[in-house]
Image (tube, rainbow, N blue to C red):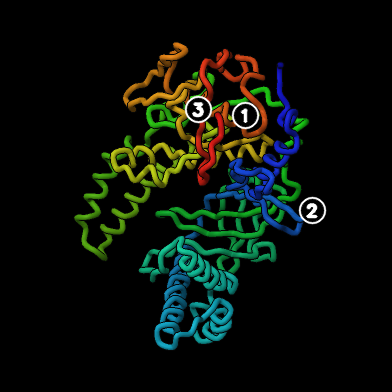
Amino acid sequence: MNSISVGDTNEETSMSVLQAAITGHVPPRLGRIQVKPLFRVHRLRRGSCQGGLAIIEIRKYRTYPYPDQEKALLEQLETCRRLWNRLLAQRKDSWEQERRSNGMFQQKRDLTSWKKANEYLARVYSHVTQDVVLRLDKAFTAFFKRIARYPRFRKFGRYGSMTYPDAYNGSVKLGTSEKNPKLYLSKVGYVPIVVHRDPPEGINKRCTVKKESNKWYAVLEYEVPDPPAPPAPELAPVTRPLGIDLGLKSVISTTEGKHVKPAKPLKAHEKRLKHLQRNLSRTQKGSKNRVKAIVALNQEHQKVAAIRRDVNHKLSRELVNEHDLIVLEDLRVKNMVKNHCVAKSIHDVAWSQLTGFIQYKGARDGRLVVLVSPQYTSMDCSECGHRQEMALDVRTYSCPVCGNTMDRDVNAARNILERGLLQVGRDTTELKPVENGVRLGQRTAPAQPFYEPGTTSKRVG
C-alpha cells in the first residue's frame, strides 16, 4: 500500500483523536488514549469571528524608541511596578488585619480614585494600569491553585513589560509604511519599529511592550478567523510518517536513521558567561559599572537563548515540511532535570521547546502530531518485541531472540512510530519499508505491554 488513510479501519476513533488533538478535549469513548492539544503558541480560543473559533497569532517586532520615548516608557514601567507593589500590599494588609479579601473589581474601583491624586498614574494609559490589577489577580489565582508561590513585591528594575489589553480600540496602531514603519502607542507616541515579517490578516487584540536588557520589543497578538484545521481523517493520506526519539547525544534520532547533533549553545558560551558573572559580582551595588555588567550578562544570555530558539525553529520547520505524521515522546522533562548530572544538558537541548514548535507548526499546516508514552521504547526490540535491560553507555541494540542489530536510538524511534500509528488506528505493517524506515518482518515474540501515563492499564505496543 503506497499510502494509508488515518481512520480507514477505525474511522470513529481516528476522527475523535484528530478532533481531540485540535481542541484539547478528549471524548469519553477514547478511553485511555492519550491525546495532547496541538495548538500551543497559535492557540484556539473563543473569538468574535464567524464560527466562534479563532487562532491567536503572535508577532514580536524590535522597536527603537527615541530618547524621550524611552524615558517615557521607563517611567511608565516604574509606575506599573509601584502600582503592583501598592496593590499587593493592599491585598496583604486587608487579609492580615481585617480578614477581608480585596478582589480585582474592588481594586479597579480604587484605581480610579488613585489616578486623580497621582500624576504619574495619569501619565499611563488607563487600560495598562487595569492590566496590572489583572496580572496580580492571575498571580493570586495561580497561588490558590497551588501552581505558583505567593506573589512577591517587585524591586526596582524587576518590572519589564506592560500590556495594552484592547489594542483594537485605537490605543495601538501599526503603520503601513514600508520604508519607515512606526507603531503608535497611547501616551507614548509613534515609535520606530522593524517589521521583519508581515503581520497576519486579522484584528490586533493585544500589544505587550517589553524591555529585554537594553532592547525594546512589541509583541502583537492578532485574532485570525477560520483556523486551518487538518483535513478529515478519511481524506488525509499518511504517506510520510516519522518517529522521533529525543536524546542528548543526538537531539533527535528518526526512523529514517537520521541523527541531528545538538547545538549546545550554553556549553559554547559557558566560559564567557562565567567571566561576565564574576565581573558582576565584583561591582558595587548602585554603581554605573554594575548596571553595565548586568546589561552585558543579560545580552549574553539572550544570545544563548536566540541560538537555541533559531536551531529549534529551523529543525521543526524541516520536519513539518517533509512529514505528514510525526510521533514524539511525551517526556516528563520536569522530573528528568531532577538528576543534576544531566540537568544542564537537558535544558541546553530544550526538548520541550522543540516539541512545542513541532506541535503548533504541524497544527497550522494541517499535519498530525502525536505524543506517546516513552516507556520501554529503548528496551523493546522493534522487530520481535523482546524486552531487555540496557545500560545507557550501550549505544547498539542487539536482540538475542531475532538477531536484530541497529542503533539504539533508531530502534527506539521505530517503537515510538509504531505506538503512534496504533494510537491513530494503523499499524506499521501497512506501510512500505521506504515510508517508515522499518524492516518488515514477522514478530517472533509477543509485543511487550506498556503503561499509558496516569493509568494502570496495559496496552500492547
Q: Nearer the viewer, mark 2 or mark 3?
A: 3
Pointer 1 residue: 421
- Give the mark nearer the N terminus: 3 vs 1: 1
Pointer 3 residue: 448
Q: Residues within 10 Å of mark 1 (few under 14, many from 20)?
A: many
User: Is residue 360 in sight in this rendering?
Assistant: no
Which is more toward the observer, 426 or 303? 426
Pointer 2 residue: 51
Report the amino acid beneath label 1. Leu
Q: SS of the residue at dot 3?
A: loop
- Give the mark nearer the N terminus: 2 vs 3: 2
User: Considering the image in quadrants, where does the N terminus appear?
Assistant: top right
x, y (%) of residue 96? 40, 83
Is 337 left, or right, of 184 in this rendering?
Answer: left
Report the amino acid beneath label 2. Gly
412 lies above or below 205? above
Q: Nearer the viewer, mark 1 or mark 2?
A: 1
276 lies above or below 389? below
Q: Residues within 10 Å of mark 2 (few under 14, many from 20)?
A: few
Residue at horizontal 28%, vertical 39%? 341
